[in-house]
Image (cartoon, rainbow, N blue to C red):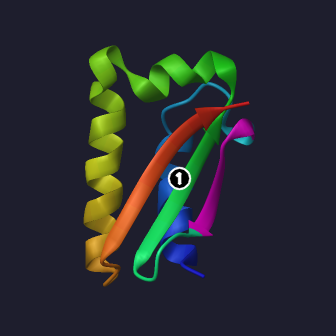
Amino acid sequence: MHENLITFTENLVKSLVKDPEMVKVQEFLGDEEVIQLEILVSDEDMGTVIGRSGKMASALRVLIQAAAYNMNIKKVRINIDSF
């Protein structure tokens, strides 16, 4: 549905991890105006994506939400998980 935001998120996360083929971004529709993105990375890349004290994850959330704002998407929730 929001392919540009998903592509942006995938490219952003793939540039950080050691195994970019394992990165998957899925979109789920939450409430009416909330888009929920789930970022899946491998277990070994989880530390890189989260960062010390969650600073990298926080920075990723800010960048993704700024991109969503530029695409006229009001609310985005981001969940980072591993498989």
Q: Residue at x 52, y 70 (%)?
A: 30
Find residue 20 and report its horizontal and vertical position in percent: 66, 37
Asked if residue 27 is among those painted magenta in the image, a careful observer would answer yes
Residue 21's place in the image compared with 17, above or below, is below
Residue 31's place in the image compared with 7, above or below, is below
Q: Residue at x 67, y 20 (%)?
A: 43
Residue 36's place in the image compared with 78, above or below, is below
Find residue 49 and report its horizontal and vertical position in percent: 46, 29
Find residue 1 and report its horizontal and vertical position in percent: 60, 82
> How many residues crowd around disc 1 within 10 Å: few (fewer than 14), some, or many (20 or more)?
some
Report the front residue among 83 and 44: 83
Answer left or right for 16 relative to 82.
left
Q: Residue at x 59, y 22 (%)?
A: 45
Find residue 50 and report its horizontal and vertical position in percent: 42, 26
Q: Mark 1 — residue?
A: 11
Report the front residue among 31 and 79: 31
Dividing the picture into quadrants, the one containing residue 52 is top left
Q: Please provide the residue range marked out in magenta.
A: 22-28
Indicate the quadrant containing the C terminus: top left, top right, bottom left or bottom right. Answer: top right
Answer left or right for 64 relative to 32.
left
How many discs mark residues in the rendered view?
1
Q: Secondary structure at mark 1?
A: helix
Q: Residue at x 31, y 84 (%)?
A: 72
